[in-house]
Amino acid sequence: MTDSTTDKSAGPSLPSIPDMIDEFKTPPSEPGGWLDLLSREHLSTTLMLSMGVALFAFNGFFVSTVLPSAIAEIGGGHLIAWSVSLYLIGSIVAGVTAAQFKQRFGARRALVVATLVFLVGTLTAAFASTMEQVLLGRLGQGLGEGVVAAICYALIPALYPSRLVPKVFGVEALVWTCASFGGPFAAGWLAESFSWRTAFLINLPFGLVFLLLALFTARPRDETVAAFARVPLSPLVLLSVGLLMILSSGVMAEPLTSAVLVVFGIALLVASVRRDRVLPTGLMPAEAFGLSSTVGAGLWLVLLMPVAQATSSVYFVLGLQHGFGFGPLAAGGLGAIMAMSWSLVAVLVAHVGTERARRRAIESGPLLQCCGMLLVAPGFQQGSLFLLVTGQIVVGAAFGASWAFLSQMLMETSTRTERDKTSGLIPTLQSAGFAIGAAFAGLAGNSLGLAETSTSETSRAAFSATFLIPVLWTIPAMLLARRATRLAAELPPHSP
């Protein structure tokens, strides 16, 4: 995988200011811009990928808005936490198997079947008469969306030239922000104006449009169908049970019980990866989570950055409400600043052309994330809205600057035979990272008494301490980012 070739531009001498500026210019030999994504060659593919991301983002965020209305009609409030947990378990488990389904049946067939599973899950939830049926529908949605998201990622390097890949991720970041920001508002309006069932049924027209686009678009020119390989069950069982334990820890009131579930759940995830490595046809790339390759170190980074970010997803809006007295609408709007910053920065850096500049952008990701959280924590402690907003903007910039180039680096440095596994594992690990991080955040919050604080002063102190803990995850992430980019620099150009 590696040889003695190194990046000559990374010499000991410091570059001049004009040279540093030139690093971030697209080379003349690689023309093309945003309009290329809308050309006749790429328009349908761009629409398909954007639709797939929109479905995934919308269904990940809207359910917390409509379930209270569903509970008022059909009951089952004690099961509400499982609506997110089962969706995440389904999407992660399905995402891990997506590469094998794509290689066995082809991208188009796999996407069609996965979309149909998603639509069946949607109809099951929309016409449910009990909360158990809603949960079954959510599980079906997760299984379908997990495959859709993973295969959409795997199709990016197959359907776009390398120069357009960062721009594709920029578009996806914009779609994700619109869906995550507008999804809950749209779902709330549908639930209030019509019914909570309508919020589920809105998926049908969008799902059918995606289905038609997949039928006519999702066929890479060089795609080949491999011989049948049985999906290994033992790693999947370990993965599923481990995720179930981790996600269950978030609904436990006793911190000790939560801690035990998290520890045993992570142990099962480690056992799943170890078991997968010894199988002849594993679910993950052979180099996954090793430290001697770009793919191994980079996948750790894909996991750790969402683990650190999950605390904001769980507690930021709540902290604004409890510590600052904001209402749900104002707190939700401020909570969306991170996503907007992510999208804006992703668009601004998408034109970066040189490999050295892209590696620097990847290394900046966990560093900016660390700096942003170090602003948020004292922001809660001091009651400073300025620090909180600035910290959220910096954290969003961390993902916007690094995520597209990190994903592209992993795709391009993976061997051709395992590129589908690597590409499809990126969104799956992202979801797993948020799930694991949410469990750690819940454990930290419960241990610090966030659920029991009564005054704004005690709330701010508890929230501040809770946001300092994720900083610990950014430290290994910074080291791994540096290692992954160093190993990538040692690879020969266009390494297979």
Image (cartoon, grey):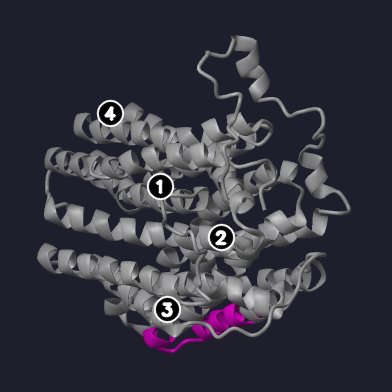
Of the residues tagged 3 and 4, which is closer to the observer? Answer: 3
Element marked by disc 2: helix
Q: Where is 201 relative to 359, above or below? A: below
Which residue position is annotated with label 1? Answer: 305
Main SS of the magenta part reads helix
Element marked by disc 3: helix
Residue 75 is labelled as none
Which residue position is annotated with label 3? Answer: 236
Instruction: Identify the residue shown where x is 50% and y is 67%.
Output: 284
Of the residues tagged 4 and 2, which is closer to the observer? Answer: 2
Q: Earlier in the sequence, mark 2 or mark 3?
A: 3
Instruction: Identify the residue shown where x is 40% and y is 43%.
Output: 480
Q: Is residue 120 left or right of residue 272?
A: right
Q: Earlier in the sequence, mark 3 or mark 4?
A: 3
Magenta-drawn stretch contains 265: no
Q: Is residue 451 left or right of residue 171?
A: left
Gap in Å between the C-alphas at discs 2 and 3? 17 Å
Gap in Å between the C-alphas at discs 1 and 4? 25 Å
Examine the rendering and report whether any part of residue 199 can be seen. Answer: no
Gap in Å between the C-alphas at discs 1 and 3? 24 Å
Which residue position is annotated with label 2? Answer: 422
Which residue position is annotated with label 4? Answer: 384
Element marked by disc 1: helix
Q: Earlier in the sequence, mark 4 or mark 2?
A: 4
Of the residues tagged 1 and 3, which is closer to the observer? Answer: 3
Gap in Å between the C-alphas at discs 2 and 1? 17 Å
Query: Looking at numbered disc 3 in the image, what kind of residue is underneath it?
Result: Leu
Instruction: Identify the residue shown where x is 55% and y is 48%.
Output: 177
x and y, in percent, of residue 194 in the image: 55, 72
